[in-house]
Image: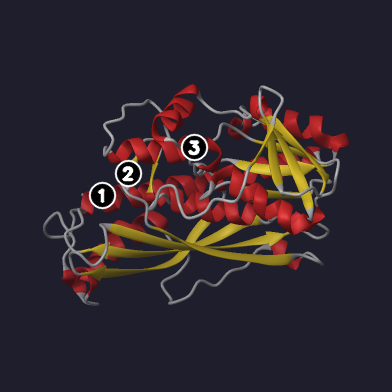
């Protein structure tokens, strides 16, 4: 049955090459699995967008795109559809934009279960609604078995940056304070455990979530926020290195203040990994002037997506390296940019 309660026109329970051939089978797949759920504002080959925010003098458009190839496609705390929405929304939000519209393109492997497609699409729809965005256009392609791994998703997003809002790493100054909105490394640890290659058993769930509403709450409390970055591939360490390099400063962290679950620390110790380099999909780092740090922290902790927020470091004049951390023993160690990738197919 379809969502509307009508009998399904789809034959079989798996995607075939006919579903990508441009005929009736393709139309039935698109209508029943995608447009019935996303309900785009038209059937043309492009979305025609209007919004009151675009008419505000000084407003600017923000545009981003990303592809998602995570394996497994479904994991504790999310799936490839949810992560696609969250990742694109967050890329807009950390630049100060209010996310409004998304596109979604699907590369589907022949033999993919239609039930899996339905779950992914419904997950995307729920997350888009929670984030306050609409999926307004998209595309599907079906490729031969073995040409991709079950399902790949590409999303693009458009948002509006309000007049006068300027967020960027170049704005960071010595004396500023660095905060994160929650625990670190949960997504990377979840994907590692979900693959089952290492016989690890852990209750950790991905932190996959959209952060647009959280960023707006912080900006209301700390209007002089300098910059933000979602700590995805390469984790917090790579995000901070990128920002510190652009700003020409050094970020001094404190190991004791970094919010990391014991389960994640334990997994990293077993595997020889550093949790600062593990990917996150619902965790950001932001910088605010010291005078607004407490207000920013309180605003984050008052929001459901920031209950685990913490101040993790401070900005100093540029030293010999961009990022260092002070250990529990009072020593310091360099937190360098990740070389290569700890875990492929993480998002």
**What numbered label is drawn on residue 98?**
none
Direction from residue 188 to residue 17 in the image, left or right: left
Residue occupying image coordinates x 51% and y 44%: 281
Mark 3 residue crowding within 10 angstroms, few (<14) / some (14–19) / many (20+): many
Direction from residue 280 to residue 181 in the image, left or right: right
Mark 1 residue crowding within 10 angstroms, few (<14) / some (14–19) / many (20+): some
Q: What residue would you read off at disc 3?
A: 207
Residue 304 picture quarter? top right
Q: Position of residue 56 (x, y in %)?
A: 78, 64
Q: Position of residue 173 (x, y in %)?
A: 84, 48
**Disc 1 + disc 3, Cβ < 8 Å:** no
Which is closer to the viewer, label 2 or label 1? 2
Q: What residue would you read off at disc 2?
A: 74
Report how far apart the C-alphas of labels 2 and 1 lie in the structure: 9 Å
Describe the element under mark 1 as helix, strand or loop. helix
Residue occupying image coordinates x 25% and y 49%: 116
Q: Nearer the viewer, residue 297 or 57?
A: 297
Label located before the other in sequence (2 or 1)? 2
Label located before the other in sequence (1 or 3)? 1
Looking at the image, residue 80 lies above or below residue 64: above
Describe the element under mark 3 as helix, strand or loop. loop
Direction from residue 262 to residue 334 in the image, left or right: right
**Disc 2 + disc 1, Cβ < 8 Å:** yes
Q: What residue would you read off at disc 1?
A: 116
Residue occupying image coordinates x 63% and y 35%: 181
């Amino acid at each position: 049955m379809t969502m509307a309660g009508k009998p399904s026109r789809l034959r079989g329970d798996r995607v075939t090459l006919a579903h990508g051939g441009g005929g009736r089978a393709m139309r039935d797949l698109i209508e029943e699995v995608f447009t019935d759920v996303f309900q785009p504002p038209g059937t043309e080959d492009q979305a025609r967008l209007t919004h009151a925010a675009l008419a505000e003098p000084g407003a600017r458009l923000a545009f981003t795109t990303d592809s998602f190839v995570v394996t497994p496609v479904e994991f504790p705390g999310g799936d490839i559809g949810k992560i696609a929405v969250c990742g694109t929304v967050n890329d807009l939000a950390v630049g100060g934009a209010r996310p409004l519209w998304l596109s979604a393109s699907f590369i589907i492997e022949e033999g993919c279960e239609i039930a899996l497609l339905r779950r992914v699409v419904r997950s995307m729809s729920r997350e888009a609604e929670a984030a306050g965005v609409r999926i307004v256009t998209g595309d599907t392609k079906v490729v031969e078995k073995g040409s991709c791994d079950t399902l790949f998703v590409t999303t693009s997003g458009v948002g509006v940056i309000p007049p006068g809002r300027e967020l960027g790493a170049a704005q960071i100054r010595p004396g500023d304070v660095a905060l994160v909105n929650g625990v670190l490394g949960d997504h990377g640890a979840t994907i590692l455990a979900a693959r089952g290659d290492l016989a690890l058993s852990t209750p950790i769930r991905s932190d996959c979530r959209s952060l647009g509403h959280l960023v707006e709450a912080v900006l209301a409390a700390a209007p002089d926020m300098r910059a933000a970055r979602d700590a995805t591939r390469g984790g917090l360490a790579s995000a901070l290195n990128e920002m510190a390099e652009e700003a020409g400063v050094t970020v001094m962290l404190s190991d004791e203040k970094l919010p990391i679950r014991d389960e994640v620390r334990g997994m990293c110790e077993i595997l020889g990994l550093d949790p600062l380099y593990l990917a996150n999909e619902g965790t950001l780092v932001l910088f605010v002037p010291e005078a607004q740090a407490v207000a920013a922290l309180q605003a984050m902790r008052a929001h459901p997506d920031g209950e685990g927020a913490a101040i993790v470091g401070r900005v100093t004049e540029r030293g010999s390296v961009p990022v260092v951390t002070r250990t529990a023993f009072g020593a310091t160690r360099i937190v360098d940019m990740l070389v290569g990738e700890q875990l492929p197919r993480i998002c």
